[in-house]
Amino acid sequence: MSDLAVFRQQTRSWLADNCPPSMRTRMVPGEEINGGSRRRSSNPEAYLWLERMAARGWTAPTWPEAYGGAGLGKAEYMVLLEELQRIGARPPLVGMGISMIGPTLLEYGDEAQKSRHLPAIARGEVSWCQGYSEPGAGSDLASLGTRADDMGDHFLVSGSKIWTSSADRSDWMFCLVRTDRQAPKHQGISFLLLSMDSDGVSTRPIRLINGASPFCQTFLDNVRVPRENLVGRLNEGWAIGKRLLQHERSGLAALASGDTAGPMERIQPAQPLGELARRYAGGRPAPAVRRRIVDNQMQREALLLTQRRAVEEAEADTPGAATSIFKYVEANYVQDQLDLQLAIRGLRGLGWEGEPFDEEEQRMTRLWLEARAISIAGGSNEIQLNIIAKRVLGLPNPPAVQGSSREQP
Ligand SMILES: Cc1cc2nc3c(=O)[nH]c(=O)nc-3n(C[C@H](O)[C@H](O)[C@H](O)COP(=O)(O)OP(=O)(O)OC[C@H]3O[C@@H](n4cnc5c(N)ncnc54)[C@H](O)[C@@H]3O)c2cc1C
């Protein structure tokens, strides 16, 4: 038997013994673990699953063992993902720690930063948020104005970040700050790690159209950040910040596993779309609806298979500019699928609360509204198309059009 076949057999048997029953079902909102203590999962078995997976290094399987991973190579990692998918296992840990700042620190962090942060992330002990966008800097991110004054052994950071997802429930923030106001805008930016417990940090939740408040405006008022929290070199944070965006758009795990806790799964109705359509149409859905269901399902399969191929073929942990294609297609898929559910349910797809709408109808209305944001978060659809045009297809910039800084090389 080959080494890989032995690994598969051992993995299958370990998962059979160690994956708790409720962790083999579709993710239930509120049961996922993002890390840290400020957001608790409502399912105790989620913690058991996290503990067991973390002890094997399988919350971050490709990270080196010294940093809390399992040091798996690509082939073994794919086997692990296949075996997890085979039993419908949930990811033990989600969030920006494991999917964004972790891989970025592996690439750009110094030894002290890696030893301090990566094992804690892999064990799910800390949660992270992203301090990129500002009231005047979104697509044109390099216009950011939050300043960090160099005081020698520390920086003093002042300014405000906006749309900071889960800032009020995070332990740490990774952020882009301006450290040189004279330099050209991409060259005066640095990448800092900032404890959310620092004096001078405050957050104000912002309410979304679906009634939830997943993000905040974050205020930074003379926050003291030790110099050891500077990642990479002073004024050279732009390249690091952009690399992190590639991880955000499509991390390896999310790509290859079909992101079992991600938006494509969260929007699935309790019963398959075909059955849902029959139920709401009294047994005979219209041909146009049937055609949309088939189109939507083909789109989903094609996307998942293409993502998987990209991961298998990628040399690095995250494919480069092509991640923009996945982000763009996924955003369209999610919005189309929710529009389709609305078409199927008709007026019952617009229930906000209470009778006569059942729980799933209400949940789907809110998801349908929430999903408007998916083509904006992490870089808008238009920005992804610009990246695809320039970095994937190699098309030239039209002379009169200024590029957005989120796309800069
Ligand atoms: C749910 C959600 C969560 C988020 N979480 C975070 C977070 O945790 N941390 C964080 O830092 N940010 C976060 N964001 C912010 C997000 O990254 C920005 O909203 C996004 O980059 C767009 O920036 P903006 O909102 O300032 O829009 P703008 O940049 O003002 O854009 C407005 C419109 O103009 C279009 N546009 C702008 N420039 C161009 C161009 N060059 N070519 C073509 N069209 C263009 C855009 O596509 C958009 O339609 C989140 C956003 C959402 C919706």
Image (cartoon, helix red, strand yellow):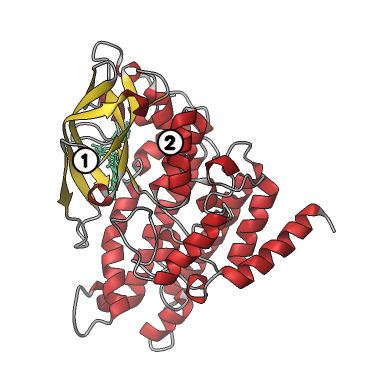
Kindly indicate whether the residue at mark 2 contacts the one at mark 1 (C-beta within 8 angstroms): no
Residue 276 image position (x, y, % from top left): 42, 80
Neighbour tally class for label 2: few under 14, some 14-19, many 20 plus, Cα within 10 Å: many
Side (left or right) of 306 relative to 265: right
| View quadrant of ligand 1 | top left
Q: Nearer the viewer, residue 171 or 282?
A: 171
Q: Is residue 75 above or below residue 21?
A: above
Kindly identify which residue carries mark 1. 162
Q: Nearer the viewer, residue 44 or 92?
A: 44
Chain-order first, disc 1 or disc 2? 1
Q: Secondary structure at mark 1?
A: strand
Q: Name the residue rendered at 44%, 61% in the picture.
A: 261
**Badge 1 amino acid:** Ile
Side (left or right) of 311 relative to 114: right
Q: Is residue 312 visible?
A: yes
**Would the CB of label 1 be found within 8 Å of ligand 1?**
yes
Residue 109 image position (x, y, % from top left): 46, 30
Residue 163 image position (x, y, % from top left): 24, 44
Location of residue 317 (image quadrant): top right
Side (left or right) of 17 relative to 221: right
Q: Name the residue rendered at 64%, 57% in the picture.
A: 80
Residue 144 is marked as: none
